[in-house]
Amino acid sequence: MKTRITEMFGIEHPIIQGGMHYVGFAEMAAAVSNAGGLGIITGLTQGTPEKLANEIARCKDMTDKPFGVNLTFLPSLNAPDYPGLVRVIIEGGVKIVETAGNNPAQVLPHFKDAGVKVIHKCTSVRHSLKAQSIGCDAVSVDGFECGGHPGEDDIPNMILLPRAADELDIPFVASGGMADARSLVAALAMGADGMNMGTRFIATKEAPVHENVKQAIVDASELDTRLVMRPLRNTERVLTNDAVERLLEKEKELGDDLKFEDIAEEVAGVYPRIMSEGDMDAGAWSCGMVAGLINDIPTCKELIDGIMQEAEALIRQRLAGFVDGKAA
Ligand SMILES: Cc1cc2nc3c(=O)[nH]c(=O)nc-3n(C[C@H](O)[C@H](O)[C@H](O)COP(=O)(O)O)c2cc1C
């Protein structure tokens, strides 16, 4: 399938694996890229420029296909060494960067000069337009359904995607709630040029996370996510567990007085314990409502090949059947 996204990034299929903390290691990115999608290493999981340079080199050993690096700009007291991370991305020959979390204007000129394409992930039409106006090459439009940070506007993709299509000139991919061929075809119908998946890629054979994490996603239904940290205007969609329910109790009790320190135990530094050690009650971890559509743990190739085959059948048979006057 050819779209503006496959052409821009030099990939076979219009499917991107979004950056994911403690999931987006070289193994994950390489598996997605080798399957014809766009795999993405999560820059901040590596922490230091040296470690990120090493992860990029490892990924290059595992794939000769294009892959990207995610740079997330977080509200943080101890800001990561962003200039150093930008430098090793460029020196490592990475040609695609996914930015997220905040306006990437500061890093954009460095990437532009180095011929790196930037796809900015955002949760609203106004932020997408801002990204376009500052020179981002594409955007990833993340609806309210998404795992991770959906922003504060709460607009689901059935509205957000056509709105983005009406306003944007640059290509965009649909993100949040995407799991299968139906998601891809619907996203394309609403004007997107492809789709970005997070949660779905965690439940794959190659995802370098503990089996408990994959099983938790398979076991979860669409009713099992919660929104945390809304009082701090840093809303995150996570899978519910004991720690999350405790956190929500604290939010209810403290109301407007809630401070980050009050919930640090449930959110700060919990990812390694969950993703690497499989301690599923260690804290809050991002997960999309799309967990309700995930019932298996395929390889990335099985997943992507299946999506592309079914998408083609959906378009050629079911959809074409309607306009040809055949009941599909
Ligand atoms: C476990 C997990 C960790 C994530 N970490 C990040 C991150 O560090 N940076 C980022 O930009 N997005 C992050 N995301 C968001 C994903 O890149 C993607 O936008 C989102 O998962 C899409 O929604 P979906 O889960 O419904 O597919 C994370 C998502 C998950 C599920």
Image (spheres, grey):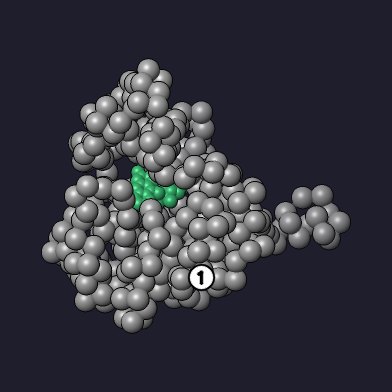
Provide the secondary structure element on which disc 1 rests.
helix
Q: Residue at x 44, y 30 (%)?
A: 226
Residue topped by disc 1: 133
Instruction: Tell me if I can see residue 27 in this picture.
Output: no
Q: Quadrant of residue 191?
A: bottom right
Left or right? Give the position of 141 relative to 202.
Answer: right
Q: Position of residue 258 (x, y in %)?
A: 34, 27
Q: Quadrant of residue 64?
A: bottom left
Q: Residues within 10 Å of mark 1 (few under 14, many from 20)?
A: few
Q: Is residue 260 shown above or below 10?
A: above
| Amino acid type of the residue tagged 1 in the rendering | Ser
**How many marks overall?**
1
Q: Residue at x 61, y 55 (%)?
A: 161
Q: Position of residue 308 (x, y in %)?
A: 54, 60
Q: Residue at x 65, y 49 (%)?
A: 159
Q: Nearer the viewer, residue 88 or 94?
A: 88
Instruction: Tell me if I can see residue 263 in this picture.
Output: yes
Residue reaching furthest to the front:
257
Q: Residue at x 47, y 45 (%)?
A: 151
Q: Is residue 241 shown above or below 64?
A: above
Q: Position of residue 168 (x, y in %)?
A: 60, 66
Residue reaching furthest to the right:
325
Quadrant that contains the N terminus:
bottom right
Q: Nearer the viewer, residue 153 or 22?
A: 153
Residue reaching furthest to the left:
50
Q: Nearer the viewer, residue 16 or 127?
A: 127
Q: Position of residue 44 (x, y in %)?
A: 25, 54
Q: Quadrant of residue 287?
A: top left
